[in-house]
Every structure is written in structure tokens, then in C-alpha cells.
Amino acid sequence: MEIVPATEDRWDDVQTVFGTRGGPHHCQCQRIRLGDRAWWYMPVEERAHHLREQLDAGSSDGETGGVAPTSGALIAYVDSEPAGWVAVAPRTEFVRYRGSQVPWAGRHEDKDDDGVWAVTCFAVRVGYRKQGLMYELAAAAVGHARERGAIAVEGYPIVPDPGQQITWGEVNVGTPGPFAAAGLTEVSRPTKRRRVMRLDF
């Protein structure tokens, strides 16, 4: 397995992970970034355009010789095949969370603190699910945030009710297990089914 920054030159691989239908394809990892108001009526093609611009912003350039500090996602390859995706960036980049109970309810956090990064979205390609790939992606996202100067990293997983089956579209925010394995611990419960988990570096 190899997990690397999802830069613009890997665009085709990102779209292979997202597929041609279903939640990841439909969203293009934009709902949390743009917020519901901007996202809801936006065509999929426009969402994809925004994503491609974000990946381009994280591509290598001649000045730094590497990935931009806020490269917003990672892509996983299994036996050289694109298999998974995780979004990770400064918490300030995710518009939807600014006005939501998640992650703020019961906390006194500075919403403008870009030193805190967030792991917000996972996608695993059909055929690679239920193999523990979310654990690998969560660990890589935490390492990515740390390497780029984050002071802390958070995740906002969903917890189903006992016996409840949740769809892949709901579980795209992650579940507690992968975050706990990556070193995050629960700090609050903003809603019945959502948790805030955090690791301070």
C-alpha cells in the first residue's frame, strides 16, 4: 500500500476512487468544504471543478519543490490501484462546520485557528471496502497534518445506534475505531450520533 497527497496530476485516480455513481461521485468531497447553501444546487460537474482546483493548489511547484502546506487530501493505492481517499486540511477550510453543532457544541474553540486540522471525509473504492483501509487512511491523515505544522488534528465520526445499519454515504465522515487507532481521543458529543475526537501534537 502507498498513501500520497492527492495532487492534480492524480485526478484520474481520484475519480476512479469516487466512481461514476453514489455518494463520493455525487459529492466530489465538496459539501463540507463549501457548505450546504453553496453545495446543494451545484451540478456535479461544478463540484468536480472545485475539487480539481483544490488539488492543483496542492500540487508540486518549482519554488517549494514539494506539496503545498495545505494540500487537502490523500489517496491510497493498493497494488498500484487507486483504492481510497481521505480529506485532511486546516479546520478553517471547511465552511459547513463553521455553522454546525459539529464540532463546536459544548466547546470553547477558536473557529479561526488554522493550526487545528480536521479529517473530514473518507472514500473507499468499491472492491476495497471492509479491508481496514479507513484505518490506514486515518493514520496517514494524522501524519500528514503533523508534518505540515498542525498543532492538533480532529475527526468527527458517526456512531450508529445499537443494531442500526448505516449507509456508506453516512459513514464517509468515519467511525470512532480508525480515529482511536490513529491516536485521537473523544473530547465531546455534540449530537446523539456524532463525536469529536482530537489529538494534540
Image (cartoon, rainbow, N blue to C red):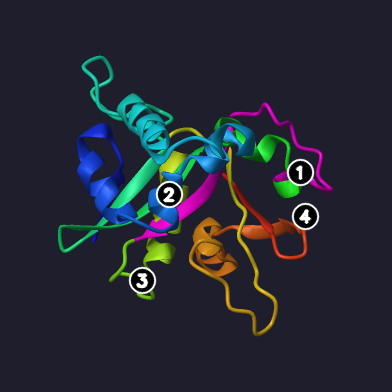
Residue 64 lies, with reference to residue 127, above or below; the image says above
Vertical arrangement, residue 4 with respect to residue 56, above or below: below
Which of the marked residues, 2 or 4, is nearer the chain's N terminus?
2
Mark 2 or 3: in front is: 2
Q: Which residue is tagged 1?
A: 104
Q: CA distance from mark 2 to mark 4?
A: 27 Å
Q: Secondary structure at mark 3?
A: loop
What residue appears at the point 21 percent right and 17 percent down from the top-left corner? 62
Tell me which amino acid carries mark 1: Trp
Label drawn at residue 42: none
- Which range of residues does the magenta coloring cover? 103-124
- Three-letter code for the amino acid on which mark 2 is drawn: His
Residue labelled with disc 3: 129
Q: What separation in Å lies between label 3 and label 1 (alpha carbons)?
A: 31 Å
> Under tag 4, what secondary structure?
loop
Distance in Å between CA atoms under marks 2 and 3: 19 Å
Q: Is residue 44 above or below residue 58?
A: below
